[in-house]
Image: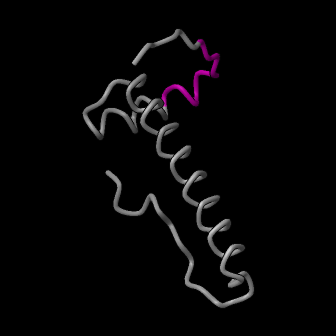
């Protein structure tokens, strides 16, 4: 996979929180942010797939439990 530089400006307080989250997971801030973005992208694509499936099968108004696809993804 090709990589590209992505520059992001954040304030000091947010950077410290990101450092804390990353440190608890034994990760660099860069790895933590990338992993978070990947997880959010997956969640969005999963939700879209569920919505499209429900629309296709006509179950849009059926009651369903709240789905959190990222639950359990470490």
Disc tally is 0
Quarter occupied by residue 65: bottom right
Q: Nearer the viewer, residue 61 or 19?
A: 61
Q: Nearer the viewer, residue 21 or 36?
A: 36
As drawn, the residue found furthest toward the top would be 5
| Residue in the picture at 31% in, 51% down | 74
Query: Where residue 66 sits in the image (x, y, percent)?
Result: 57, 77
| Residue in the picture at 58% in, 51% down | 45
Q: Quadrant of the N terminus?
A: top left
Q: Is residue 40 left or right of residue 63?
A: left
Q: Is residue 11 above or below residue 43?
A: above
Query: Where residue 55 sits in the image (x, y, percent)?
Result: 72, 73
| Residue in the picture at 30% in, 30% down | 27
Q: Is residue 63 above or below residue 72?
A: below
Query: Where residue 14 sits in the image (x, y, percent)?
Result: 57, 30
Q: Is residue 55 above or below residue 8?
A: below
Q: Is residue 22 left or right of residue 26?
A: right
- 61 is within the stretch colored magenta: no
Q: Is residue 2 left or right of residue 37?
A: left
Image: magenta residue range? 7-16
Quarter occupied by residue 59: bottom right
């Amino acid at each position: 996979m090709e990589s590209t530089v992505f520059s992001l400006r954040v304030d000091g307080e947010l950077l410290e929180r990101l450092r804390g989250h990353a440190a608890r997971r034994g990760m660099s801030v860069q790895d933590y942010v990338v992993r978070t973005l990947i997880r959010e992208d997956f969640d969005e694509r999963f939700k879209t797939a569920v919505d499209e499936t429900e629309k296709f099968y006509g179950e849009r108004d059926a009651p369903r439990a709240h789905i959190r696809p990222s639950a359990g993804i470490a």
